[in-house]
Image (cartoon, coloured by chain):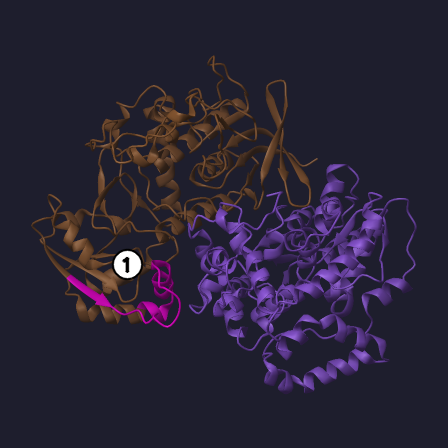
Amino acid sequence: MKKHHNNPDSCTACTVCIAHCPVTAATNQFRGPKMVGPALERMRLSQEDVEPSLEYCSNCKNCDMSCPSGVPISTLNMLARAKLFKTRKHSKRDYILSHGEQAAKLAAMMPFGAALANMGMDMSRGILKMIGISDKAPLPPYAATSFIKQFKALRQQSYPDKVVFYPGCFINYNDPKVGMDFVAVMQANQYEVIVESDLVCCGSPLVVNGFLDEAEANAKINIEILKKWTDQGIPVITCCTSCGLMLKQEYQELFHIEGVEEYAKHLYDAGEFLLELYDKGRLNTDFGTLNEQYMYHAPCHLRAQGMGLPGLELLEMIPGLKVTNVDAGCCGISGNYGFKEDKYDIAMKIGTPLFTKLKESGLSTAVSECGTCRLQIAHGAQVKTLHPMTLVRRSYEAKKK
Amino acid sequence: MRENDVIVIGGGLSGLVAAAVAAQSGKKVLLLTLGAGTLTIGGGIVDVLGYGDEGVSLATPRAGLLEVGPEHPYKKIGPVAIEESIQFFKGICAAEGYPYLGSLDEMQWIPTAAGTLKPTCLVPKTMDTTQLNTAKNVVVLGFESLKDFYPHLITKNFKNIPGFQDKNYEMVMIDPGLADGRDVTALDVARWLDTPEGLQDCTEKMRHVLTPGSVVIIPPVLGTRPNYAIADSLAQALQCTFVETAAVPPSITGLRLRTMLLSYVKKLGVRIVEQAAVARSIVENGKCTAVVTAGIDRERTYYAKAFVLANGGFYGGGLVAEPGQVIEPIFNLPVVAPEDHGLWANPDLFSNKPQPFAQIGIAVDEKMRPLDGDGQVVLTNVFIAGRNLQGYDFCFEKSGNGVALASGYQAAMSMDREIK
């Protein structure tokens, strides 16, 4: 597990990954993780081998999680995709979906830019469809004020214990409330939160569309900034599970960047960090009662991180709160996969068992860490969604009242 | 500090059974898994014992239990606990709405996709051969474009099997309409049948080729979920008896079994950490206090009062072979292996003798606690279950899931008595 060398020969062709791949279950156009990943990688090592169904892999990581032999199958697929685009041009669609950060930055620079961009997005759905983005896809609107701006306007109480928060694009531009809730939770635990404004997109949306060189450039920028803190032993925390997976695991699997192993030791999911505080007797457990009931969806990219479901475990500590793990597999969206015109139906089909169970629960709101999971769940199950940190903050505030 | 009563390492059959036993007795259980285990590769049936030491088929699994050698896990576990483990397993299956058939007093000979018969003990209802054994006329039904299930091969080989020689065979094919895509596996056909439209389509297509009252051998395609809804629907609509064969992976019957066991342990509140690569343990005064996982980012420590080690053998990573020695990497437990590694393998593959390497493993006492060379218990709160046990060649004697079930059960039961 620790030493990742992407060796296709560790695969014994046992087919467990095929049985656990959500895309394979949803479409017979994908030849499946075993074939497209390790089996064809052996070919690709000796000659160019173009496998048309490679584009169907959503990088959800269920194959990696099921593999009894520790083969990073999805990473082999992402590397193969990158190799393919060394000699081919990307589509406009894939460019746009991979570079959401640039568009968001532009919108954030203009006065009322977010509102205008949102209006523009509504009007341009026809154009987006023409280039291959589904007009039904749950594209997220921009927030009126980015997280970074809101954070800078916030006056924090200073504490000797500090953490660095990596917001990621979705929290920064689309869902800043999650970031602000996280900061409030840390303040309630007598931590001061540091946010570096020069951090860039983690690279996850770039990797899945084969922009590997750009993703590596982003990785280097982020690691350089974050290492300054992790070298001092200051933890770096994410609330987005795909950012977290990228920063700690995929950087190591995909790139060879010096010092990445040492830096990765200090990266935490917000829920996991708070549980570790609990283990040390350092967590503020002065939770107020929330007499509420929710279903919880575990993002695949959280499950892949080998730390269980810390967000759920944390919510179980809040008195009155009843949270049930819906446990119905992948939601289908996988970052920007489900936005694509030719993948939208597959993504919706993958998510159907989850949507069905959520609807059957009769509850109006679902909880999940991943931003795009929340978009897909809101779209597919017609429910509202929350990040666990929002509930933790509300519980602390309920106590104060 | 979050502490568990019990940590089970390994999410295969032995680990899931141990977790179920412990959780059912009210313990707080944490299950650490790495990969989905081998249930989805194996056949979803529980072989207890099919052949004796000389490769001679046994009359019943119970008859074989009396003859196993002193190092065999069954000898340590004993007939009472083995019987209890089978009842426990059948209880889970019944509670989950997917009951299994069979007992120690009856050998089930089930058909395989290669046209052979294989001895086993516990099978899902869809592998019940009662009707098949007495039928004069048998239909072998294949699916167009499905790999690894060829009715003519099955029929041809059945003609050589006593008891199956004199039956009349009819071969029929139906088209699931899956040719437009990748190579078709039984999993694809099962998923087609999972959908209401697919089930209806399949029923109509079968109606054209099957006469009511037929006994029909089919690949394992009767749905991916652990229930008999699809089997019952087809049987009722067509008035036929369907018998699923054992087949090559991905195993649909194994997938059903895994789904069922996971569902059961989750209902009992067992917490599961996936991708948990347990690398080492923390031991104080002959007791384990914690195990440590090596994630790609950092180590994580998990505390408990007792531990079940059910992480497999060489294939699962529970045992690691190095030149001249075999290592159990988490607790560094003694592993019993021939000193001369030239003796690990019997190079004569078809000699009809067990393989020495298959019998390499951890020696245990009757409570499934690990022993050293002098027969002394090495760790008092660690219990061993499944493929890492010494003294059996599951492939040769057909005992894999049986040992997993009985040892998982015994490990959790004796642990339960220890930590009360």
| Dot 1: element | helix
Query: Which portion, as a residue range, is magenta?
Result: B171-199
Count residues near mark 1 (Cα–Cα under 10 Å), then give few for <14, some for 14-19, many for 20+: some
The colour applied to the residues of chain A in this rendering is purple
Residue B416 seen anywhere in this rendered image of the structure: no
Question: Label 1 amino acid?
Answer: Asp
Left or right side of B313 for A386: right
Chain ID, mark 1: B
Residue B154 seen anywhere in this rendered image of the structure: yes
Q: Residue at x 51, y 65 (%)?
A: A48
Whether residue A220 is in magenta: the answer is: no
Q: Residue at x 66, y 67 (%)?
A: A211
Q: Nearer the viewer, residue A337 or A386?
A: A337
Residue B4 percent coordinates (x, y): 61, 34
Residue A7 vs B16, above or below: the answer is below
Left or right side of B354 for A149: right
Residue B169 percent coordinates (x, y): 12, 57
Count of labels in the image: 1
Whether residue B178 is in magenta: the answer is: yes
Residue B85 vs A113, above or below: the answer is above
The colour applied to the residues of chain B in this rendering is brown
Q: Mark 1 sits on what residue?
A: B232
Q: Nearer the viewer, residue B144 or A175?
A: B144
Q: Nearer the viewer, residue B241 or A223?
A: A223
Q: Residue at x 47, y 35 (%)?
A: B18
Quarter of the image that includes the N terminus of chain A:
top right
Find residue A111 and report its image quarter: bottom right
Find residue A223 and report its image quarter: bottom right
Residue B101 vs B333, above or below: the answer is below
Q: Nearer the viewer, residue B353 or A373?
A: B353
Residue A140 percent coordinates (x, y): 69, 73
Quarter of the image that includes the C terminus of chain A:
bottom right
